[in-house]
Amino acid sequence: MGIMNKLRLNLRYRILISMLTIILLSFLVAGGVAIYDHYEQSEKYNLQRLQRKEESVRASMKYFIEQMGDFVQPEVMNMVFSDKICELSDVHNLFIALFSLEGEYLVSSSSFAMDSLAIPYTMDPVAMKQLKSGTERVVLEDIIPREDLTLAYWYVKDTRNRPLAITCVAYDNTDADPKNLTAFLTELGQSYILLFLLATGVAYLLSRYITRSLQSIAEKMKGIQLGRKLEPVTWESTDEIGALVKQYNEMLLELEKSATMLARTERESAWREMAQQVAHEIKNPLTPMKLRVQYLEKAWNEKAPNFDERLKVFAQSMTEQIDTLSHIASEFSNFAKLPKPQLSQIHTVELLMNVIDLFGQQEHCKVNLRTYGPGSDELVADKDQMIRMLNNLLNNAMQAIPENKEGLIDVALRKGSKNIIIRVQDNGVGISIAQRKKIFSPNFTTKSTGTGLGLAMVRSIMTQYGAHVGFSSREGKGASFFLIFPAKSI
C-alpha cells in the first residue's frame, strides 16, 4: 500500500513539475527574444505604423464626409460619426475620439477605452493653440500618467475645407509588433521548435504513466452526448482516476438535470421574447389607427363637407396598416418570424404623407412635413417595414412630449444625389447621456409600459438595408432621429 501511495505521489508531482518547467522555459526564452527585438526596432516601427493608420483614418473620414455632403455639420458630428469611428477603430485597432472645435469631448469609439487610457475629456491647451495656428498635425507624447501613450490631433474638414471637429487617435507604444516581423517570427519560431522538441520528449515519458489507465475511460466518454441518455462511467480501482470517475458520475447526474431545465427555460424565454416583440409590432399601428377613427367620427358628427374624401383617405391608410398587421400575424404563425423584406419601388414623400396623416390629427401635437434637395425621393425597400419604422419614430416622438406642453414634430426629407435622409425631430424631454448608449439595445425603454424593441427593430431593419440610423438630443429640448439611405441602392 505504501508503494502504491509513493507511485501516485510521484505521478502527480512529475506531471506538475514537468509542465511548470516547460511553461517557465517557454516564457523565459520567448520573452527574452521579444524584449530584445522590441527595444531594437519598436520605436521607429511604432511611429511609421501610427502614421499609416492615421492616413487610412483620414482618408476614410474624408470619403465618408464626401458621401454625406452638406448634411455633416459641427453640431451633429457626434451623431453622424458615432458608428463610423467605431468601424474605423475595429478595422485599424486604434482608439479614435472626436472633440469639438473648442476642444470639448464629443464621441469616441469606446468610452471604456477613453477612461482606461486616461485620455482627458478636454484637449490640451497647447495642442489647441498649435492647431489654431495652422499646424496640420499635433502629436503629444509621454502623457502623464500614461507615459507610454501617444496622442495625435488633426482637424476634420468638410467638402469646403472648413473645420468640423478635431480627431484624436491614441496609440499605445507598448502594444506594437516589431517592424521586421519575419525576423521576429523566425527567432521566436526557432525557440519554440526547441521547446516543442523538449516538451515532446517529456510528454512521451509522462504519457507512459497515464495513457493506459485513461484510455479506457476516454473510450467510454466518447459516446456521451447531451440530449441522449447519459450513462455513468464504471471504474473498479480506488486510485486518483477512480476518485475522478466518481466525481464525474455525480456531475453527470447534475448535468442531465441542468440540461433538461436549461432546454425548457430557453424554449420559454425564446417564445416569451418573440411574443413580446410581435406584440410591440402590432401595438404601434393601433395608436394612429385609433386616432384616425376618432378623427373620422368627429368629422361625421360635425357633418364635414369633405367627409367622402376624408373617408377615402381613411380607408387607404387603414388598409395599409391592417396589411402590415396581417403580415406580422401570418409570419408569427409560421414559427413566430417577422416578415422578410418584400422590396419594391417607393416614393418616400407619398409614404411619409400617408403615415403622418395618421398622427397629424391631434389637438396637443402638430406634425409637419418638409422636403428639400434636388434629388429623387425614390427608394427600393419593403413598404411595410418602412411604415413600421416611421410609426415607431413618430410614436416615440409623441410619447416624449410632456402632456402640459404643446407638441411639435418636424419630419424632414432631404433628397440628395447620394443619400436620402429622413429626420424625425420632436420638442420633448430629450435623451439623457446615460440613456444614449443603450437607446438601440433590445428591451431597453424609458417608458413604464414599453417593451424596448421599437428602436432595436428600426436599427435591425436599417442594417439589413445597408443604411444607417442615428440620433442627436439635448435634454429638455427634444431629440432628432435620422434614417440615412443610399439613394436607389437599398
Image (cartoon, rainbow, N blue to C red):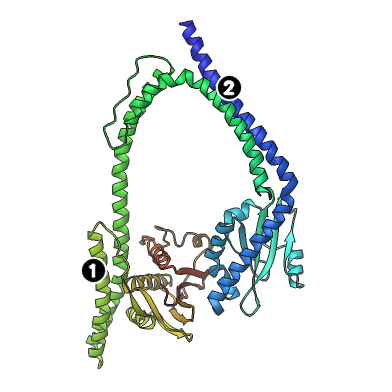
Q: With respect to residue 165, does 30 lie above or below?
A: above
Q: Position of residue 53 (x, y in %)?
A: 64, 60
The residue that disc 1 covers is: 326
Residue at the spot x=34%, y=15% of the render?
Answer: 236
Please, what is the three-letter code of the amino acid marked with disc 1?
Answer: Ser
Viewer-proximal residue, 38 or 194?
194
Mark 1 vs 2, N-terminal side? 2
**Helix, strand or loop for disc 1:** helix
Residue 147 appears in the figure: no
**Left or right of 2, for residue 238:** left
Q: Quadrant of the N terminus?
A: top left
Q: Which mark is residue 202?
A: none
**Can residue 398 be seen from the camera position used here?**
yes
Between 29 and 328, the residue placed more toward the observer is: 29
Residue 302, horizontal then vertical, whole percent: 24, 89
- Residue 278 position by quadrant: bottom left
Q: Secondary structure at mark 2?
A: helix
Residue located at (39% from left, 77% from top): 379
> From what the image shows, is residue 391 above or below residue 438?
below
Q: Residue at x 23, y 68 (%)?
A: 326
Residue at image point 71% right, 49% down:
42
User: Where is mark 2, residue-wise?
Assistant: 17
Place residue 134 in its image quadrant: bottom right
- Counting from the top left corner in percent of width and height, residue 2 is at 48, 6
Camera-side mark, 1 or 2: 2
Graded by Cα atoms within 10 Å as few (under 14), some (14 to 19) or many (20 or more), the crowding at tag 2 reads: few
